């Protein structure tokens, strides 16, 4: 089968079987083309609430599918590949967070949405990269323990100096792996390009940015800017999507290694197989975990309005 034939079959089957496909924008263009909705973590979690189909397939990583299940318990929610985890979301245990909560008993725990459902049960509010700053500023608390990303946390602490923000040493190995030298080299090669970067990168990288924001913020900025060239400081698929969408503008990547291997586990043939057989990685959460985790996601949705 050609790619087009696989895509057509996916479109036919998802309609027949009443499946909604959500895709994170780090997925490849062939996956995004067959999705009902493509977006960043925040947009996907908002969308997951309003979906009317009986079944939802999350093309992304596990915490995104868990968030969809937490918000839509009446639906069957499947993850596009059983091994598609997020190393950042899974790096801390409940006991580790508990120990830090004891160290900072007066601090509200703010969790990046890139956390497991289990960790969300211990937190007061969730944030995504596009909503983090707004929510921390809007929170009725001056003392915050931010988990798990030290880079996003540092960005929040710097831009919200009026609050005491405590951090843990967690983070994304993909964004955190980008070096300042790579930024300097790209800027030297493309002196007229604006540098748009994700806050999961280290401060050594974000300090060179013209704009720091989530994948959606980066894409919106590139669409609206009158500039013609951009260095994209996040997963390389964003530069690929933007090049396809805006052929009159130029998008440069920082490194050929700026790829999330977990996001790339999802394939068109895997999606087709799931739709044909109905067999896949179904997200199951106990009602106790789901309700406890839902509190901090509801709080995120309330505070980001
Ligand atoms: P956003 O979708 O919030 O930009 O986050 C990027 C990411 O790393 C997803 O895991
Ligand atoms: Fe997780 Fe990083 Fe991949 Fe995002 S890019 S899913 S934070 S490992």
Image (tube, rainbow, N blue to C red):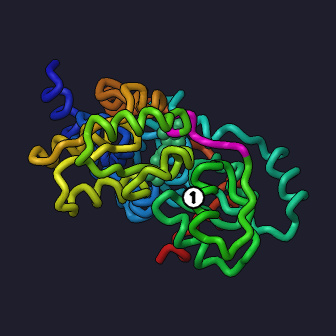
Asked which quadrant contains residue 170, the reply is top right
Q: Residue at x 21, y 63 (%)?
A: 224
Q: Residue furthest left?
A: 248
Q: How many marks?
A: 1
Residue 282 seen in render: no
Query: Which quarter of the image is occupied by the N terminus?
Result: top left
Magenta residues (range) = 169-175
203 left or right of 47? right
Q: Residue 181, image x and y in percent? A: 46, 33
Q: Residue furthest top?
A: 1
108 left or right of 85? right
Q: Residue at x 71, y 50 (%)?
A: 119
Q: Residue at x 57, y 58 (%)?
A: 155
Foreground of the two, 69 or 120: 120
Query: Where is mark 1, residue-wise?
Result: 155
Q: Residue at x 26, y 47 (%)?
A: 193
Q: Residue 135, image x and y in percent? A: 57, 71
């Amino acid at each position: 089968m050609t790619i087009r034939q696989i895509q057509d079959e996916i479109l036919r089957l998802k309609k027949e079987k009443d499946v909604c496909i959500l895709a994170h924008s780090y997925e490849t263009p062939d996956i995004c083309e067959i999705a009902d909705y493509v977006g960043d973590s925040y947009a996907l979690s908002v969308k997951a609430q309003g979906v009317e189909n009986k079944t939802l397939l999350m093309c992304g990583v596990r915490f995104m599918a868990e968030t969809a299940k937490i918000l839509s318990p009446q639906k069957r929610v499947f993850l596009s590949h059983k091994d598609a985890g997020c190393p950042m979301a899974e790096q801390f245990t409940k006991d580790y967070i508990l120990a830090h909560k004891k160290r900072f008993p007066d601090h509200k725990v703010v969790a990046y949405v890139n956390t497991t459902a289990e960790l969300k049960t211990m937190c007061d509010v969730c944030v995504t990269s596009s909503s983090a700053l707004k929510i921390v500023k809007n929170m009725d608390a001056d003392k915050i323990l931010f988990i798990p990303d030290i880079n996003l946390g540092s960005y929040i602490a710097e831009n919200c100096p009026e609050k005491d923000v405590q951090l843990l040493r967690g983070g994304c190995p993909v964004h955190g792996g980008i070096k300042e030298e790579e930024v300097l080299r790209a800027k030297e090669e493309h002196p007229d390009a604006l540098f748009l970067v994700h806050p999961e990168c280290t401060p050594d990288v974000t300090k060179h940015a013209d704009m720091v924001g989530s994948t959606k913020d980066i894409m919106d900025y590139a669409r609206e800017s009158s500039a013609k060239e951009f260095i994209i400081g996040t997963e390389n698929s964003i530069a690929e999507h933007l090049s396809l969408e805006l052929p009159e503008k130029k998008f440069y990547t920082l490194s050929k290694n700026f790829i999330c291997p977990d996001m790339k586990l999802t394939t068109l043939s895997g999606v087709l197989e799931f739709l044909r057989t109905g067999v896949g990685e179904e997200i199951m959460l106990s009602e106790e975990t789901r309700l406890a985790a839902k509190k901090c996601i509801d709080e995120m949705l309330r505070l980001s309005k």
